Image (cartoon, rainbow, N blue to C red):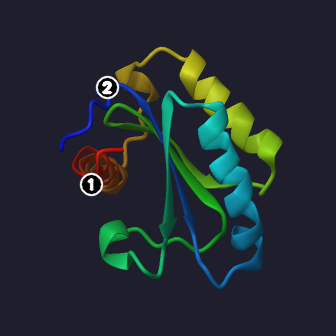
Amino acid sequence: MLSSTPPDSLLVACLCADWCEVCRDYRAVFEQMQQRFAQAHLLWIDVEDEADLLEPLEIEDFPTLLLAVGTQARFFGPVMAQAQTLERLIRAQLAAPVAAADALPDPALAALVGRLRQRLSTSGA
């Protein structure tokens, strides 16, 4: 069954590793944000289990977040593993109008956003 995910919805992907203690602790915070921001789609991606999905990107710092509105990557980088930081980033993207000028110009990020959107549409999320 295909999802009814709006094409301009906010996608928040946390790129972490299971062996990382900071990531393991942060996961609960990340999952709580999904409950607070039902209009956003939050995905937890283990960089080692899903290396093919992330190719050619290499994630070296944890946690790393990717925020996209529609097909446009709007933020990509490591963040402090704090609820306040995540909430601020989500609120800023939900409040911002979608504009092509806001997109990060990296084709690898655009391709990753496309793959993640495809995952959402096929998972029924």
Q: Secondary structure at mark 2?
A: loop
Left or right of residue 74: residue 85: right
**Which tag is nearer the camera, tag 1 or tag 2?**
2
**Please, is residue 57 above or below residue 1 in the view?**
below
Q: Which residue is rendered at x = 77% and y = 57% of the image?
A: 81
User: At numbered mark 1, what does the secondary structure look like: helix, strand or loop?
Assistant: helix
The single residue placed furthest to the front in the displayed view is 1
Location of the C terminus by quadrant is top left
Amino acid type at mark 2: Pro
Q: Which mark is residue 6?
A: 2
Label ID, residue 44: none
Q: Residue at x 35, y 24 (%)?
A: 100
For the residue marked with disc 1, what is the amino acid? Arg
Residue 6, horizontal then vertical, whole percent: 31, 26
Residue 70 vertical placement versus 84 (above, below): above
Q: Is residue 33 left or right of residue 111?
A: right
Q: Which of marks 2 and 1 precedes in the sequence?
A: 2
Q: Find residue 25 and report its horizontal and vertical position in percent.
A: 77, 67
Q: Please tell me in which quadrant of the rendered image residue 95 appears.
A: top right
Residue 30 visible within the image: yes
Q: CA distance from mark 1 to mark 2?
A: 16 Å
Where residue 54 sits in the image (x, y, percent)? Answer: 37, 68
Looking at the image, residue 72 lies above or below residue 44: above
Q: Residue furthest bottom?
A: 19
Up the image or down, 41 lies above or below 23; here it is above
What percent of the width, then of the height, locates residue 106? 36, 49
Q: Mark 1 and 2 residues: CB-CB less than 8 Å, in contact?
A: no
Provide the residue designation for mark 1. 115
Closer-to-camera residue (67/31): 31
Can residue 56 be seen in this snapshot?
no
